[in-house]
Image (cartoon, rainbow, N blue to C red):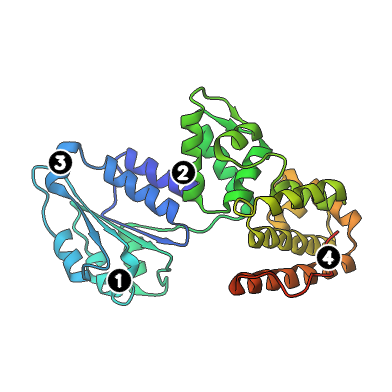
Amino acid sequence: MDEVLQIVNDIKQGKIKPIYFLFGEEAYFIDKISTYIADKVLTEEEKGFNQMVLYGKDVTIDDIVGNAKRFPMMAERQVVIVKEAQHLSRTIENLSPYAENPQMSTVLVFCYKYKKLDKRKTLYKHIKKNGVVFESKKLYDNQVSEWLRRTLVSSGYSISHKAAIMLVEYLGTDLGRINNELEKLKLAIPDKKEITPEDIEQHIGISKDYNNFELKKAIGERNILKATKIVNYFAQNPKDNPFVLTITLLHSFFAQLLQYHGLNDHSPKNVASVLKINPYFVGEYQTAAKNFPMKRVSQIIANLRELDHKGKRSQLRKRKPSRPFKGTVI
């Protein structure tokens, strides 16, 4: 996140490079940087003749280089953005001669999503020397909440811990999807304020009381009544609460709990670091560890795997499992 801000700030200050190679698993940051370049490097008057968008599946490296070597018309620079550049992965190294001696009046941007650029090869070294190489990595669950908070703060909003976790638990770590929901929230809540679980429930449709976050917490506390109510709610609303998602999250929780049991240092700072969780939730693992000894956790993980297998098998066959599951979680 800090690297993204650095790239944007450099562009704001006029420190513009001739090549930006944006690659990696997280499409959101790639789109964010390329959109910023498209919006800010040229004026509206200059864009008509000096900005073009190419698509990797429709062009070759020679086509891109040919366009990049053109001189701008009545402007200091031209911008060439190559979207879906991952389609050029087999020939991407052919860009190396241009990257070694790029056209300084061109800003060439590659959006190379879901793939890696080999750092051992010449192309990477040339771009690193003459331009910007940015790897957009997927954020860990504990990092997504912080990104979400910072995104809202930049717009004048804040968000409670529970509301942030509700969004992450429900939407996963897809930053683009989360950002879309945040935009909806900002439209629905024009007065800048703290976004609460009630706001999430009202405007996005995630129940503040019946969600995976509350289920995980109830199970960790061995609150059987509350956990049963949530599971029954899920059963009545299966489209909004996919079985596979719930099982996956519970498996992740107990796998982390097993890891917690194996730690020698149970200080909150170390637990948060090793388990890659928000420090806010360390207490939940401490409570769950008291309620579920290591041997029991191992049994639960095995049960969850069996449930996952049966659930996926029943979905494939489009019918209920032939026999009920006899294992337990709590």
Reading the image, the residue beneath label 2 is 180
Tell me which amino acid carries mark 4. Answer: Gly
Tell me which amino acid carries mark 1. Answer: Leu
Q: Position of residue 152 (x, y in %)?
A: 52, 35
* Label 4 element class: loop
Instruction: Report the disc number at residue 262.
Output: 4
* Label 1 element class: helix
Task: State how far apart marks 3 and 1 are (Cα).
Answer: 28 Å
* Label 2 element class: helix
Badge 4: few (under 14), some or many (20 or more) residues near its Cα, within 10 Å? Answer: few
Tell me which amino acid carries mark 3. Answer: Glu
Tell me which amino acid carries mark 2. Answer: Asn
Task: State how far apart marks 2 and 1 are (Cα).
Answer: 29 Å
**Which of disc 1 and disc 2 is earlier in sequence?**
1
Reading the image, the residue beneath label 3 is 46
Badge 1: few (under 14), some or many (20 or more) residues near its Cα, within 10 Å? Answer: some
The foreground one among 52 and 318 is 318
**Which of disc 4 and disc 3 is earlier in sequence?**
3
Reading the image, the residue beneath label 1 is 88
**Which of disc 1 and disc 4 is earlier in sequence?**
1
Q: Please tell me which residue is depicted at 66% across the width and 60% down the height of the picture.
A: 243
Q: Position of residue 84 (x, y in %)?
A: 32, 62
Q: Please tell me which residue is depicted at 78% across the width and 48% down the height of the picture.
A: 217
User: Which numbered mark, 2 or 1, is in the foreground of this view?
Assistant: 2
**Which of disc 2 and disc 4 is earlier in sequence?**
2
Image check: 204 left or right of 56? right
Is residue 149 visible to the viewer in this orientation of the structure? Answer: yes
Is residue 269 visible to the viewer in this orientation of the structure? Answer: no
Q: Please tell me which residue is depicted at 83% across the width and 65% down the height of the picture.
A: 262
Image check: 330 left or right of 126? right
Q: Quadrant of residue 115?
A: bottom left
Task: State how far apart marks 2 and 3 are (Cα).
Answer: 30 Å
